[in-house]
Image (tube, rainbow, N blue to C red):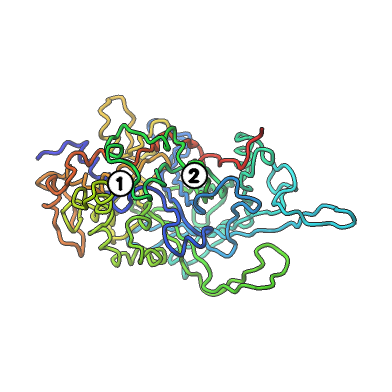
Amino acid sequence: MKMKPASIARGCLLMAVAGAAMASSHREAPFIATVPKVDGTDFYMFRSYEGVSTAGTGGRSDYVTLIANYQPLQGPYGGPNYFSMDPNALYEIHIDNNGDAREDITFQFRFNNRLNSAALPIGTQNVQIPLIQGGPVSAINDPNLNLNETYSLTVVRGDRRRGVAQTVATSLPKPVDYIGQKTLGDAAAYRTYADRHINTVNIPGCAMPARVFVGQRQEGFAVNLGRIFDLVNAPASLLLDPAAIDAEGANGNHYIQRQNVTSMALEVHRSCLTAGDPVIGGWTTASLRQARLLNGAPPSGHQASERAGGAWTQVSRLGNPLVNEVVIGLGDKDKFNASAPRDDGQFLSYVTNPTLPALLGVVLAGDAAALAPTNLPRTDLVTTFLTGITGVNKPVNTAPSEMLRLNTAVPPVPFANQNRLGVAGNALNADPNKVNDNAGFPNGRRPKDDVVDIALVAMVGGLCVINGDSNALGLDSVPGVPSLNSACRATSVPLRARAANIHDAVDQSVVPFRDTFPYLNTPNPGASNL
C-alpha cells in the first residue's frame, strides 16, 4: 500500500499524542486533588509567534515560549481569598536538551504573599478588613491591595537539586486575580493592568534577555469534560460525526472555558535552551516540603497555620496532556506524579496495553472489542510517545521517556494562519496558497493546537488504518517492546476508517487567545458591572 505524504504526516501526528487522550490534567491523582495550588493542568512549549511574518521570521520568532498552568477549575467568583500561589511550594519548568531524559536546565518559581493588614476605623478601633482589596485596583502594588503576591525566578543548570543555581529575579510582582469589573475594570482595563506585570529579565549564561509573566488567565483548553467523565455521556452518533458540536460546547462556551487558571509564562531565546541538537524536551513539576506541621492555635497573619520543612518532594508532573488523568491506572497516579522521565519504563504497560480504548468500547458500544484495537502491545502508540518522531521532533540521541518535545529549528506560524491540527492539518490542506504549518502539535504544543480529537483517533487505532499492511509509516522499534508493527493495520481496528471521525464534540479553534505574550486570554471576571 503506497502512502501519500499527507497520510504519513497525519499518521505521525496521531502517533505523537498516543499517551494523551482528551485534554489537560485536572484533579488527575488522589493526592493532588487535595492540594490544588500545586496541581499542574497544562504545559505548552512552542516557537513564539508574536509579530512574525507568514515566512516565520521577524517579531519574536527566535524565542521559545514555555507556559505551565496550575490550579485547575478556578471559579472566577472564588473570593474572598481567590487563588494565590503557595509560598511553601516549588514550581519548576525543566528542559532536556540532549535526549537523556534528565533535566539540563530548570527554571524555578517561588512565591511570597505579603499581608498588608488593611484596616478601617470602626468606632474607636481600627479593624482589619476581610477582603484582599480595599478599593479599585489599577497599578502594580496598588495601595488598595491587602495582599501582595511576588515571586522569584532561579535558573539551575544540571540536576535540579544538585546543579548550579543562579538568581534571575527576585520580588517580581504578580497581578491580583480578576476579582470583578468594579475592582479592576472591564476586560481591556484588566489586560492593561496585567500586562504591566510582564517583565524583561536577564538569564545568567544567556546573551539574550527573556520575558516572564505570572498571573491568572482564562482556561484555554476545549474539552467536553463533564460528558467524558460521566462514562462518555454522549451517543456514538455524536462522537463519530466530525461535524457535530455538542450544545454544551457551542461557540467555545464549554464548562472549563468559563473557569480560570494561573500561568507561569517564560519566553527564552532558543539559543539559550539548545545544546547542539535543535530538539528539546520539556515538562513541569511542583514540589512540597516533606514535612508539614499544623498549629492548632495559629498566630495572626497569612497562612500562619502551617509550618513546612524538610526536603522538596515532587507531587505534580506534566509533559504531554492528560497522560496521568486517563492513561495511568488509578493505583499509580500518585507514583507517576512523583516520578521523573528517566524512570518511565515502570509505566510502559499503560501505553503498550492501554485501557482507554476498551473503556470507550464498553460505554459506547457495550463491548470492549467494539472499539479496542487488537495489535497488542500497542507499538503504534509507544514509538513516538516515548521517543519523538523521526524527522519531526526526535532528538539525535534519545532515552525513551514521556515529555513534550519541540524542534526549535522549525519556524513559527502567525496565530491567524495556524492549523489547529498542526502538522497533520498542514499536510492535509491541498491549497497551494496555504501557509505551511509544521510548528504545531506534536512539534511542541501551542494554545490553539487541538490535541483532543486527534488523540482520540490515535487511541482507537486510527494510526493503524493509515499504516496499512506493510508498515508504510516505518514505525521505529522501541527498546524493551516486541516489534509487532506488522499487526498495526486496518484489520486490527474495529472502527476501520471511521476511527478518523471520533472527537469530543467541542471545538478548540473557537477558543479566544492572544497573539502576543503571554498568549493565553484575559481571565473571566468574578462579577460584571450591571
Pick whichever, 368 or 63, lies toward us.
368
Q: How many marks?
A: 2
Q: In the image, which disc is placed on residue 455?
A: 1
In terms of secondary structure, where does tag 1 sit?
Answer: helix
Residue at the outermost front position: 366
In the drawing, does residue 353 fall left or right of residue 98? Answer: left
> Could you say where residue 230 lies in the image, as x and y percent from the top left?
37, 49
Would residue 235 be found to the left or right of residue 338 on screen? Answer: left
**22 vs 138, nearest the viewer:** 22
The part of the image, by quadrant, that contains residue 136 is: top right
The answer to whether the residue labelled 2 contacts the one labelled 1, judged by CB atoms less than 8 Å apart, is no
Q: Residues within 10 Å of mark 1 (few under 14, many from 20)?
A: many
Could you say which disc has been placed on residue 307 in the image? Answer: none
The image quadrant that residue 329 belongs to is bottom left
Give the amino acid at mark 2. Answer: Glu
Label for residue 219?
2
Q: Residue at x 43, y 48 (%)?
A: 44
| Structural distance between the alpha carbons of marks 2 and 1 | 20 Å
Residue pictured at 55% horizontal, 39% vertical: 522
Report the residue that reaches farthest toward the right: 124
**Quarter in which the N terminus is drawn:** top left
Describe residue 319's horizontal placement relative to residue 198 as left or right: left
* N-terminal label among 2 and 1: 2
Considering depth in this image, is 448 or 267 the residue closer to the camera? 448
Q: Position of residue 261 (x, y in %)?
A: 52, 48
Q: Which residue type does callout 1 highlight?
A: Ala
As helix, strand or loop, the secondary structure at mark 2 comes to loop
- Position of the C terminus by quadrant: top right
Residue 275 lies, in percent from the top left, at: 37, 55
Dot 2: within a 10 Å radius of its alpha carbon, few (fewer than 14), some, or many (20 or more) residues? many
Percent x, y for residue 102? 37, 63
